[in-house]
Amino acid sequence: MIPGPVEFEPSVLQALGAPTSSHVAPGFLESFGNSLEMMKKVWICPSGQPFIVAGSGTLAMEMAAANLTEKGDNVLVVSTGYFGERYAELLKRFGAKTNVLKAETGKTVSEDELEEALKQKKYKLVTFTHVDTSTGVKVDPRPFGRLGKKYGVLTILDGVCSVAGEEIIQEEWGIDVVLTASQKAIGVPPGLALMVVSPKAMNVWRDRKTPVGSYYCDWNNWLPVMEAYSERKPSYFGTPPVNLIMALETSLKLILKEGLKERFARHERIGKAFRAAFRAMSVNTIPENETHSASTLSCPFFPEGVSGQEFMKAMAGSDVTVAPGLLPEMKSEYFRVGHMGSVNNADVMSTLGAIESALTMCGYRYEQGSGLKAALEVLK
Ligand code: PMP
């Protein structure tokens, strides 16, 4: 129950263990082509250009930055935690002039604040983290799409902790790049950088005056490969991770079989159940309110009097794995519970059972069973 890598479906793992075919074998052309088609459905971006490249989520961030910025471009980075800060650092490597609009910990920036920032300077890009995995804060992408259009700014959504877990309607919401990695709600072991890019952003890239500053990330190298595989034709730039892409095809099929609406609703229900449980136990979480709380992970503080170290030790002795805090300035004050991908009601109850036991072992006084009861109410 960590925020990635998550637990994977047996059929996804079987695809990883299958004999590795040639990257131009007919069966693999089909898998790659199907995966590209299904990405457009999962992202809900029928006219977008999908990319599947070997790498982690950071590479997906880097690929969007490398292709869409040129030296001296102004970029607004909206930060709701650790990964917003990372994006600002990364963009500087490509010569972007970044301004960081930083939300107070646990909060997001309002639509007015965003508009104010966009009025002050002509930006080429604005980036934001849909769910920051260090804080559990969820940002509403819709105002970014609206204002991006109004001010002629491209929008990049870091969806590493949200795609296939939180609702995203990329095309309707007007988001230009939605990027993610395989190891979270997409449900495939780590190793794939994934993104869908709007026709508008592809045109901005085509109009570049200078070459892309990264050979591996350059869409000039990857676009012909994606286009060929879409037509089930062989192509090559860098050897694709054959088995991971077969696993991606398997997982995307499962996601679409479940139904996006149903999948988002399941994540929402499970997120609510965790928050109801923490509230019932008087355990505070980082996001300031329900609207800003992610469905994909929770970030609860250690209650007063409970030693974080002791709590994590007690959890390590249980059958449930949770993650430590990540935000540098307060990482010892909280822990993180991931609840995305194939999580079900039983996972919620066993995780909360382990958390309740660990809190009790650490001397926390509260009504035992209250968290479990509150979660059950939501799940019912
Ligand atoms: N953005 C967010 C929101 C993330 O959660 C992560 C990983 N936890 C990343 C970017 C970076 O992804 P990776 O670790 O796969 O490079």
Image: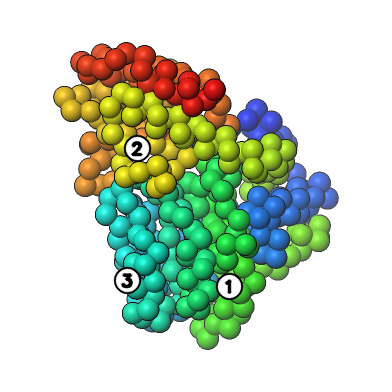
Residue matched to label 3: 99
Q: Give whichever of 312, 131 is nearer the camera.
A: 131
Q: Position of residue 129 (x, y in %)?
A: 43, 55
Residue at the image position 32 percent from the left and 13 percent from the top: 368
Nearest to the eye among marks 1 and 2: give it: 2
Residue matched to label 2: 299
Q: Position of residue 337 (x, y in %)?
A: 40, 32
Residues tagged 2 and 3 counted as in contact (Cβ below 8 A): no
The residues bearing labels 1 and 2 have C-alpha atoms spaced at a distance of: 34 Å
N-term-proximal mark, 2 vs 3: 3
Q: Is residue 39 above or below residue 371?
A: below
Number of the label disc, if any, that sits on residue 275: none
N-term-proximal mark, 3 vs 1: 3
Q: Is residue 122 above or below residue 194?
A: below
The residues bearing labels 2 and 3 have C-alpha atoms spaced at a distance of: 27 Å
Image quadrant of residue 72? bottom left
Number of the label disc, if any, that sits on residue 201: 1
Image quadrant of residue 53? bottom right
Three-letter code for the amino acid on which mark 1 is drawn: Ala
Q: Is residue 247 visible?
A: no
In the visual, does 338 lie left or right of 205? Answer: left
Residue at the image position 58 percent from the left and 38 percent from the top: 265
